[in-house]
Image (cartoon, rainbow, N blue to C red):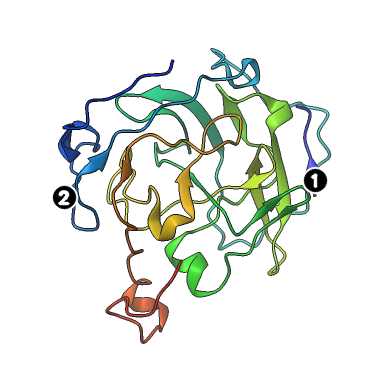
């Protein structure tokens, strides 16, 4: 791993899904939202106006030319969900319970990584609202470097159709919106266990209907 320098609101049991879902959420993969207590943020998760990656961080090997990089991490609070981390385009990022943070390791590969694209880096992301001591990277099986927050590798979700959505929340019971300190955001948990969307049609997967796909 290449490491860089670095309240509780109780909702009514009658809260509807639309009170918790982001704009454009169609509820296709979930039923009514279950009210959940939101943990108070620790001092290390305080959203700072500006925080930038240390210029002293070691330079990384150049990533493959065809890899989309995450150039920026933004920690902020959004309506209903609370504290989140987004990339430079506003896509909300997630963490995976089957990964590890100490030591950092990503276990989402192949078909999983088609549905949950890893946030890849060249080692110098711009940081806003995320403390630089919480951000690092881990080398994936294919040799690319993936950003970590609080040690946890972070990902996008192809089921989110526009920036600001969080349709990946609690998918498979293992995927959760990540907070700026790397902890799970447990707001807006759906009842039941939502399924992930199928891998993109052009990926060569035969699992077009999503049957048997567990990530």
As drawn, 85 above or below 11: below
Extreme residue toward the top, this view: 49
Residue at 51% across, 51% down: 155
Residue at 68% across, 47% down: 122
Residue at 51% across, 27% down: 75
Extreme residue toward the bottom, this view: 206
Extreme residue toward the front, this view: 13
Which residue position holds label 1?
A: 2
Q: How crowded is mark 2: few (under 14 residues within 10 Å), some or many (20 or more)?
A: few
* Depth order, front residue of 18/135: 18
As drawn, 9 above or below 113: above
Q: Where is residue 130 in the image (x, y as percent from the top left)?
A: 59, 25
Q: Position of residue 186 (x, y in %)?
A: 43, 37
As drawn, 116 above or below 37: below
Report helix, strand or loop for mark 2. loop
Which residue position holds label 2?
A: 26
Tell me: 73 left or right of 80.
right
Mark 1 vs mark 2, CA separation in Å? 39 Å
The label number, if any, that marks residue 141 in the structure image: none
Q: How crowded is mark 1: few (under 14 residues within 10 Å), some or many (20 or more)?
A: some
As drawn, 104 above or below 204: above
């Amino acid at each position: 791993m290449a490491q860089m320098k670095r309240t509780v609101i109780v909702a009514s049991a009658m809260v509807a899904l639309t009170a918790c879902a982001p704009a454009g959420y169609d509820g296709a993969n979930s039923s009514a939202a279950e009210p959940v207590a939101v943990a108070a943020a620790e001092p290390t998760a305080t959203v700072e106006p500006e925080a930038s990656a240390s210029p002293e961080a070691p330079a990384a090997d150049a990533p493959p030319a065809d890899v989309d990089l995450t150039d920026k991490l933004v920690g902020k609070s959004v309506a209903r969900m609370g504290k989140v981390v987004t990339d430079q385009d506003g896509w909300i990022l997630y963490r995976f319970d089957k990964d590890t943070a100490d030591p950092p390791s990503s276990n989402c590969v192949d078909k999983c990584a088609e549905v949950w694209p890893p946030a890849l880096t060249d080692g110098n992301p711009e940081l806003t609202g995320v403390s630089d001591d919480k951000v690092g990277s881990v080398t994936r099986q294919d040799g690319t470097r993936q950003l970590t927050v609080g040690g946890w590798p972070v990902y996008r979700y192809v089921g989110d159709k526009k920036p600001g959505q969080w349709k990946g929340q609690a998918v498979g019971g293992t995927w959760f919106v990540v907070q700026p300190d790397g902890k799970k955001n447990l707001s807006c948990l759906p009842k039941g266990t939502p399924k992930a969307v199928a891998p993109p049609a052009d990926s060569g997967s035969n699992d077009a209907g999503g049957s048997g796909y567990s990530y």
